[in-house]
Image: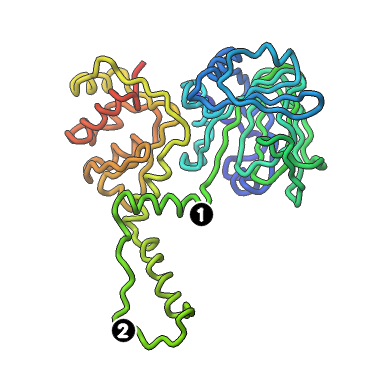
Amino acid sequence: MLTLQLSEFSIQEFLANYWQKKPVLIRQGFPGFYDLIRPDELAGLACEPQIESRVIYKKDGEWQAESGPFESYGRFGKKDWTLVVQAVDHWSPDVADLVQAFSFIPKWRLDDVMISYAAAGGGVGPHIDLYDVFICQGSGRRHWRVGDRGNHRQFAAHPVLLHTEAFEAIIDAELTAGDILYIPPGFPHEGVCLENSMSFSVGFRSKSARDMLSGLADHLIDQDLGSALITDPERPLHTEQGHINNSDLAMIKAQMQAILNDETVMTDFIGSFLSKTKCELDLQALDDEISEDELIDILHNEGLRRTGGLRCFYIDHSIGQGVCYIDGQRYVFGAQTQDAVIALCNNDEIDADMLADGLSNPVFVKALQEWVNQGYWYTD
């Protein structure tokens, strides 16, 4: 498993001084780093319709972008193009391991691991991201420039490419295998390949209030909650029909606030909403389903591994009842399973010792058996 090496500051100092504050170049954050997936394997993933991919290049001096799936790449030539593939951690266990190196950031903030292969001269142009990213350099060399936050003019270089105007660099460096460049939201940056190269970008993104409120509305509808109407049996005389007065406005806001203040409703919504995956999972359902006895045997002898990209969370408010949220679904296993549920959510690899309290609970064992048969957890 990859271990992040910080020679100039600690993780605590990184969080205090850099996280969402300013970019930083971490030389040899992964000493001896090698490509976690071969270029031809990445190109193969981009041939699959369920995987989001894009090729970015220039034609006659103009930026171009094409979305996958791709049948071949020969027409792009030998330089000046980039293949970008999203959520590769969902499809490669080795790439999924990269996420663990950044486990000091909670997984509910994880977006995905995006990987790019670029021919010499390739890049995606100067741009600004709205999320935090750790760009881990693999094979080859890339020249990166990062500017400061500011009022940078952005423009559409292509219908799907939002670029930013020229900027003055505060980081100007060549990255080689094992180097890591951290860039918070809002900082303009641009990378250009000096030779054929790979980069592995671990992105972290929070949700907007708009997305959360939209998701909450869907949750209330799905669970048939929040349907009670406002009642005001002591309403005073109203003399202006077109006026929404301060007392009525306060009453309407209180109706909405009551939902936000309901700890149970909000806990279940947040757990379910944040555990949904935005990209498809590589679920390999078993042709020959395992029995409960076989599951217990596997846990004692081999252990299980969580499929890449699967999101499993628990929340303080409900973990005492053994509640967890997996891929958008709420599960309740009882108070005695609390330690097993925590282990299940916190670890990519699990075994019988870690799940000891849960294995004495038939409901927990049955759920784990179904998850394994569906491909959410697997054994080598």
Q: Nearer the viewer, residue 15 or 292?
A: 292
CA gap, disc 1 and disc 2: 34 Å
**Which residue does the numbered mark 2 point to in the structure image?**
234
Residue 316 seen by the camera: no
Label 2 near label 1: C-beta < 8 Å?
A: no
Q: Is residue 11 left or right of residue 148?
A: left
The image's mark for residue 303 is: none
Q: Is residue 163 left or right of residue 346?
A: right
Out of 204 and 349, give the one closest to the viewer: 204
Whether residue 12 is visible, yes or no, is yes
Q: Residue at x 41, y 86 (%)?
A: 238
Q: Is residue 220 above or below residue 230?
A: above
Scheme of image coloration: rainbow
Secondary element under disc 1, as helix, strand or loop, is helix
Disc on the earlier residue, 1 or 2: 1
Amino acid type at mark 1: Ala
The image quadrant that residue 71 belongs to is: top right
Q: Of tags 1 and 2, which is closer to the observer?
A: 2
Q: Residues within 10 Å of mark 2 (few under 14, many from 20)?
A: few
For this orientation, the residue located farthest to the front is: 241
Q: Is residue 319 above or below residue 38?
A: below
Q: Quadrant of residue 360?
A: top left
Horizontally, residue 315 falls left or right of residue 124, namely: left
Q: Tell which of 82 and 138 is nearer to you.
A: 82
- Locate residue 299, reporting x and y percent: 27, 23
- Name the residue rendered at 48%, 80% in the picture: 243
Q: Looking at the picture, which amino acid does disc 2 mark?
A: Glu
